[in-house]
Amino acid sequence: MLGNEKKEEVSLTGNQMAEIVKQEKLKAKELSRQASQMHAIINEINGSIQAVKAVQGKKGLQIIVPLGAGISLDAIIESAEKIKTTIPGNIIVEKTPKEAIEMLESQATAVKKEIELLKGEILQASNKIREFSKVMKLAQSQFSRQNAQSK
């Protein structure tokens, strides 16, 4: 039955095609912005993993704790056997450093998958832009030739 499908022909004006190209460019730009934000999230996750590894098993380690808005305070880690993490609902739970690292790595994997999906969407948008641009250039070329012949 797949071979019996009817093909539909669609006619678009030059302005409609230009608008499609414009929309696809905007879409690709937004998707790229989202991918950049996700790369920043990956960097933050990787930094957190490194920080957990750096304090793991250490006692009496002096650190600087950022409180926000450029304000920090000195602190001493009494024990890094339990790491505090926030779960949805702003609930704080304790995890071992190993569990915290596994959780962070899982988050990083999920974000990387999202980035790959975005890359696919960006590629699709780029392909549409390229195809419509080719058709528009071809149509402009034919239009110019027809005008030249009619003069």
Image (cartoon, grey):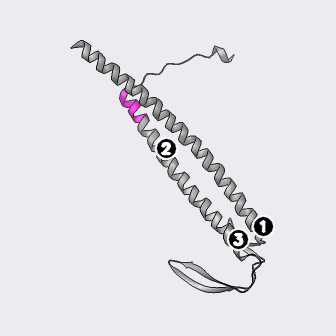
Part of the protein shown in magenta: 6-20
Q: Residue type at mark 3: give it.
A: Thr
User: Which of these two is toward me, 55 or 83?
Assistant: 55
Q: Nearer the viewer, mark 2 or mark 3?
A: 2
- Mark 2: few/some/many CA within 10 Å (<14, 14-19, 20+): many
Instruction: Locate the C terminus and report the quarter of the image it occupies.
Output: top left
Residue 16's disc number:
none
Residues tagged 2 and 3 counted as in contact (Cβ below 8 A): no
**According to the image, label 3 marks what residue?**
85
- Mark 3: few/some/many CA within 10 Å (<14, 14-19, 20+): few
Determine the secondary structure under disc 2: helix
Q: Please state the horizontal and vertical placement of residue 50, each as a whole percent of the image.
A: 67, 69
Say whether disc 2 or disc 3 marks the residue closer to the N-terminus: 2
Q: Which residue is found at the position 59% from the left and 41% from the top? A: 120
**According to the image, label 1 marks what residue?**
99
Q: Is 27 positioned to the left or the right of 42 in the image? A: left
Q: Residue type at mark 1: give it.
A: Glu
Image quadrant where residue 84 sits: bottom right
Say whether disc 3 or disc 1 marks the residue closer to the N-terminus: 3
Q: Please state the horizontal and vertical placement of residue 75, each as a whole percent of the image.
A: 64, 86
Q: Please state the horizontal and vertical placement of residue 67, each as a whole percent of the image.
A: 57, 79
**According to the image, label 2 marks what residue?**
28
**In this rendering, is residue 109 above or below 53?**
above
Determine the secondary structure under disc 1: helix
Rounded to the nearest whole Å, what is the CA distance between mark 3 and mark 1? 10 Å
Q: Which residue is found at the position 75% from the left and 63% from the top? A: 102
User: Which of these two is toward me, 142 or 6?
Assistant: 142
Q: Please state the horizontal and vertical placement of residue 86, each as a whole percent of the image.
A: 68, 69
